[in-house]
Amino acid sequence: METYSPRPAPAQIARPPSSIELRGKKKFWERSIWCSGALFLVTPMIGVLGTVIGMRNAFASLGADGIGDPSALSEHIGKVLIVTAWSLLVWLPTLIFLIIAIIRFLSCRAKLRDLPC
C-alpha cells in the first residue's frame, strides 16, 4: 500500500533556472518596468487633458446658450466624467502591473546575486 506524501518526489521538483534564463527574465522585467512606468505617468495626463478640454466645451456651451438649457451642460459634463473614468480604469491596472514588475525584477536580481560565479 502506498502512502501519500504532500511533498513531490525528487524527480518532480523543478530545476533552478540557469543564469542565462535569469538574465533574460531580469531584462524582460526591466523593460516591463519602463513600459508600465511610462504608461503609469502618461495615462493621468491624458485624462486631465480630456477633462480640461471637455470642461472648456461645457462652459463654452453655457456661455453661448446661457443657463436656459441645463441638458446641454450636463451632456458635456457627462462626457468629461467618462474620459476621467477611462483614464483611471487604464491607470489602476498599470499601477498593479508596475508593482508586480518591480517585485519580479528585484527577485531575479537577488537570485542572480546568489548564484555561484
Image (tube, rainbow, N blue to C red):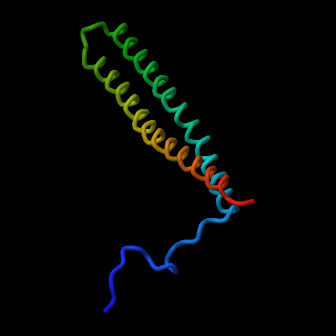
**Rendered view: 77 above or below 107:** above
Left or right: 17, with 96 as reference point = right
Q: Out of 57 and 106, give the one closest to the viewer.
A: 106
Left or right: 45, with 20 as reference point = left
**Rendered view: 114 above or below 45:** below
Image location (x, y in percent) of residue 75:
30, 23
**Rendered view: 71 above or below 1:** above
Q: Quadrant of residue 34?
A: top right
> Which residue is depicted at the point 40% across and 38% down?
89
Image location (x, y in percent) of residue 63:
36, 7
Q: Out of 111 and 30, give the one closest to the viewer.
A: 111
Q: Out of 74 and 92, give the one closest to the viewer.
A: 92
Image location (x, y in percent) of residue 47:
46, 28
Q: How many numbered discs, if any?
A: 0
Image location (x, y in percent) of residue 80:
37, 25
Q: Quadrant of the C terminus?
A: bottom right
**Rendered view: 2 above or below 52:** below
Q: Out of 29 and 16, give the one closest to the viewer.
A: 16
Q: Quadrant of residue 60?
A: top left
> Which residue is depicted at the point 36% across and 78% down?
5
